[in-house]
Amino acid sequence: MLQRLWRWLKRYFQRLFGNQQTRPLREHRKIEPAKRLTDAEYESLFFELLAEVELGSTKGEVKAFLDGKRINKTHLVEWLRSFGERLVDSPNDELASRMVRLGELGIGEVSDVAYEIGRRLEEIGRNRTGAEDEEREAEVEEITLDELLIRLEQDANLVQQVAQQLGIETTDPQVIIEALINQFNAADDSTTSEGEFWFYQGVAQHKSGNFAGAMASYDKAIQLKPDYHEADTVGEFPKQLN
């Protein structure tokens, strides 16, 4: 008797409240299908995602952020791969670093692709920096002191620029060369370098026809460096001075 009464009450309440409960549940489960965004919308969303990473959000927080956008993640990954190809032409170190950090969170395929792109951009950036450094080194022209002296004698603007760098006021190339030697010697007390300077200056003077000045420069080179055989064995000058 009690069992039949309980079954009747149960069916009664199901009929009474069943329709009212079913409708809200159906509405709660109704989810609009994810739509494909434009490239600009995906880019905006992705940078929001990277901002969450930069703020130090946890794996769960970043995943919740992405899930909350209710987008088709397959479409997002497709866009991200295309976006990565465009970044190759203009790699950005900061963007690459953030993408790697997103990848390290491990929130799915979006993370995997972001990590792959970030590492690739970092490698491109390192290679490009190395190439640029080599180009800058190649652009640095190595000249001897006698060549510098000749250029200073021929270029008043160069004289002014070098004098300003040295912090001296002069238009005399010889004074500038001496100042360069003094600064070098202050950093590295080497009589050999100064001896080489006088030797190369002697070569320059010889080429310009100043044989007496060249001999004097050679004498200074020998005084500074007695074993400087290049200066000690020059035999052209006495013949040309006679």
Image: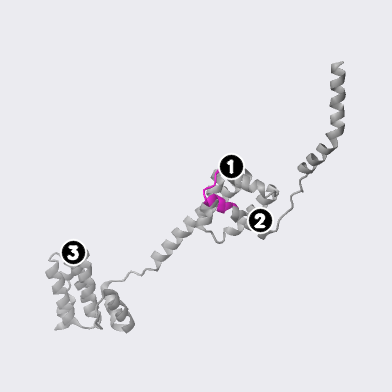
* Residue 166 vertical position relative to residue 82 in the rendered view, above or below: below
- Horizontal side of 171 relative to 85 (left or right) equals left
Q: Residues within 10 Å of mark 1 (few under 14, many from 20)?
A: few
Observer able to see residue 153 = yes
Q: Is residue 51 magenta?
A: yes
Q: Nearer the viewer, mark 3 or mark 2?
A: 2
* SS state under label 2: helix
Q: Nearer the viewer, mark 1 or mark 2?
A: 1
Task: Name which residue type carries label 3.
Answer: Ser
Give the camera-side residue of 189 and 234: 189
Q: Residue at x 13, y 68 (%)?
A: 224
Q: Residues within 10 Å of mark 3 (few under 14, many from 20)?
A: few
Observer able to see residue 119 = no
* Residue 190 vertical position relative to residue 240 in the rendered view, above or below: above
* SS state under label 1: helix
Q: Residue at x 45, y 60 (%)?
A: 131
On the image, the x and y values in percent for residue 197 come to 21, 71
The CA distance from mark 3 to mark 1 is 64 Å
Q: Pointer 3: what residue? A: 190
Q: Pointer 1: what residue? A: 60
The region drawn magenta spans: 49-58
Residue 42, which numbered label? 2
Task: Name which residue type carries label 2.
Answer: Tyr
Q: Are marks 3 and 1 in contact (CB under 8 Å)?
A: no
